[in-house]
């Protein structure tokens, strides 16, 4: 789904503010897309892309054998990568459920005797990672889900015939019933990611899901749960997908809103065997820091394979990011955009974040000896490399020296010049941690 104007609205006052604090602090989460589509291994939309009928597609349920789906390993990998929450697809658009549902037989419980959602929830709790569910409001398998422009049967000659008798009201009760099961059967759920609404032009709108009633039920059953904005009505956050916003996201009134970018490692959410367009760990990390610097969260996806195992490319990337996070998490967890009142201009080749009275300068390209930061003069108490705590000298221009060949050319009085070593620290993304003078704008907040 791409970001549409409808999906950019967010209401941040719906969940109690302290219930959302963990989410704002977390900044980094793991998305896990798993379902029958992992077997054909050609993207999670294969059912509709290849116009597969439910009868044909559901044979994958008989072949479903996720012997390598190891929720504990996933939970541990997430925690070690510095991710504070993880979100599993309870049901994707294909309709297959990864949980034991009294309302359907099209479940992992029936297919292989396992409630994968329960395994996931238990494992996350053990690792101290917050629990999130992705739930598709779209369902290409359910016999009452009316055929629309995205449906696998949309191009069938007998479409009218196939569509006859489908009753969205009955489907709606199924949808609400399953959400109720998920919110009553698995303890506390921290995050709910609904997906998605596509009104107009033979699509589905909030009235089809009865989004108001569905959201009210979520609020009643799990008052602390963070809910996204893809029911076609405002939720607690907005959800840009597979792109990095240019700046902190705002509502129509210009107020910044809570947001989370969901991103893939290779462009596909579900396992896509022959897709090797993997983003490098370095790029993924820069995306994370860019997100934090714009006040958002990043939800990074992995798609387990047909046996539920993880791709080496994904686990390698997460391990590299985790190694970096061990030393640098202070620039991510609990951090956010730099207070504009500080008046800092990010120098080229840097990404900035701020956490209280600490400013974090991430150096995406390593400068030769000097890094000049405008707007910082008078605000710096101390600076160090975050990876090893080694002091970084800094200076402001000495008016007496101005114009002499010893001063670094063309810098303004409000500039702080940091002197960095010639050798770039051997980490994925070097960070200078700047301790701000208390009283500098935004410091201590
Ligand atoms: C979408 C897609 C999808 C994916 C997702 C993740 O809009 O339909 O396959 O699950 O969003 O955000």
Image: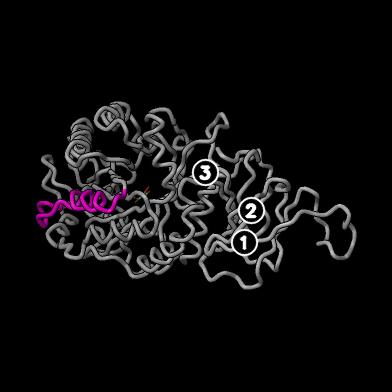
Asked if residue 126 is among those painted magenta in the image, a careful observer would answer yes
Residue 254, x across and y down, in percent = 58, 32
| Image side of residue 369 versus residue 241, left or right | right
Find disc 2 in the rendering and name its residue. Answer: 382
Find disc 1 in the rendering and name its residue. Answer: 391
Find disc 3 in the rendering and name its residue. Answer: 295
Relative depth, front residue between 140 and 23: 23
Residue 412, x across and y down, in percent = 80, 51
- Dot 3 and dot 2 residues touching (CB under 8 Å): no
Q: Considering the whole magenta stretch, tell me its main secondary structure.
A: helix
At 19% from the left and 53% from the top, the residue drawn is 119
Relative depth, front residue between 50 and 322: 322
Relative depth, front residue between 392 and 414: 392
Considering the numbered disc 3 on the image, is that residue within a helix, a strand or a loop? Answer: loop
* Quarter where residue 239 is shown: top left
Categorize mark 2 by other alpha carbons within 10 Å: few (<14), some (14-19), many (20+): some
Considering only order in the chain, which callout, 2 or 1, is on the residue closer to the N terminus? 2
Numbered range of the magenta stretch: 108-129
Q: CA distance from mark 1 to mark 2?
A: 8 Å
Residue 229 in the image: above or below residue 408:
above
Residue 285 in the image: above or below residue 377:
below
Q: CA distance from mark 3 to mark 1?
A: 28 Å
């Amino acid at each position: 789904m791409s970001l549409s104007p409808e999906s950019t609205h967010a209401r941040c006052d719906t969940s109690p503010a302290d219930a959302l604090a963990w989410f704002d602090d977390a900044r980094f989460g793991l998305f896990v897309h798993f379902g029958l589509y992992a077997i054909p291994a050609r993207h999670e939309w294969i059912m509709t892309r290849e116009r597969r009928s439910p009868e044909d597609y559901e044979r994958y349920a008989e072949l479903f054998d996720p012997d390598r789906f190891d929720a504990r390993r996933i939970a541990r990998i997430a925690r070690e990568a510095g991710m504070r929450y993880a979100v599993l697809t309870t049901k994707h658009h294909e309709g297959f459920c990864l949980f034991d549902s009294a309302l359907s037989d099209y479940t992992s419980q029936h297919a292989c005797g396992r409630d994968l959602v329960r395994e996931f929830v238990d494992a996350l709790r053990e690792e101290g990672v917050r629990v999130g569910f992705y739930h598709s409001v779209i369902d290409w398998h359910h016999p009452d889900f009316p055929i629309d422009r995205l449906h696998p049967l949309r191009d069938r000659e007998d479409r009218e015939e196939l569509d006859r008798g489908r009753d969205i009201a009955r489907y709606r009760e199924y949808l609400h019933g399953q959400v109720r099961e998920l919110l009553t059967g698995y303890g506390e759920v921290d995050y709910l990611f609904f997906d998605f609404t596509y009104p107009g032009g033979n699509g589905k709108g909030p009235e089809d899901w009865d989004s108001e009633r569905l959201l009210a039920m979520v609020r009643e059953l799990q008052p602390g749960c963070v809910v996204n904005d893809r029911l076609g009505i405002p939720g607690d956050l907005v959800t840009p997908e597979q792109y990095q916003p240019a700046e902190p996201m705002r509502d129509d009134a210009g107020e910044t809103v809570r947001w989370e970018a969901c991103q893939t490692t290779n462009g596909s959410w579900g396992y896509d065997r022959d897709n090797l367009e993997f983003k490098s760990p370095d790029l993924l990390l820069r995306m994370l820091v860019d997100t934090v610097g714009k006040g958002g969260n990043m939800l990074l996806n992995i798609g387990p394979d047909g046996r539920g195992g993880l791709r080496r490319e994904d686990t390698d990337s997460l391990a590299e990011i985790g190694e970096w996070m061990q030393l640098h998490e202070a620039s991510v967890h609990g951090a956010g955009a730099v207070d504009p009142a500080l008046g800092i201009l990010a120098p080229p080749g840097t990404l900035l974040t701020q956490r209280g009275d600490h400013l974090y300068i991430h150096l995406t390209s390593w400068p030769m000896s000097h890094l000049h930061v405008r707007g910082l003069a008078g605000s710096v108490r101390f600076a160090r490399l975050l990876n090893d705590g080694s002091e970084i000298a800094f200076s402001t221009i000495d008016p007496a020296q101005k114009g002499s060949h010893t001063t670094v050319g063309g810098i303004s009085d409000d500039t702080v010049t940091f002197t960095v070593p010639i050798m770039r620290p051997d980490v994925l993304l070097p960070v200078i941690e700047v301790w701000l003078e208390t009283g500098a704008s935004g410091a201590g907040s």
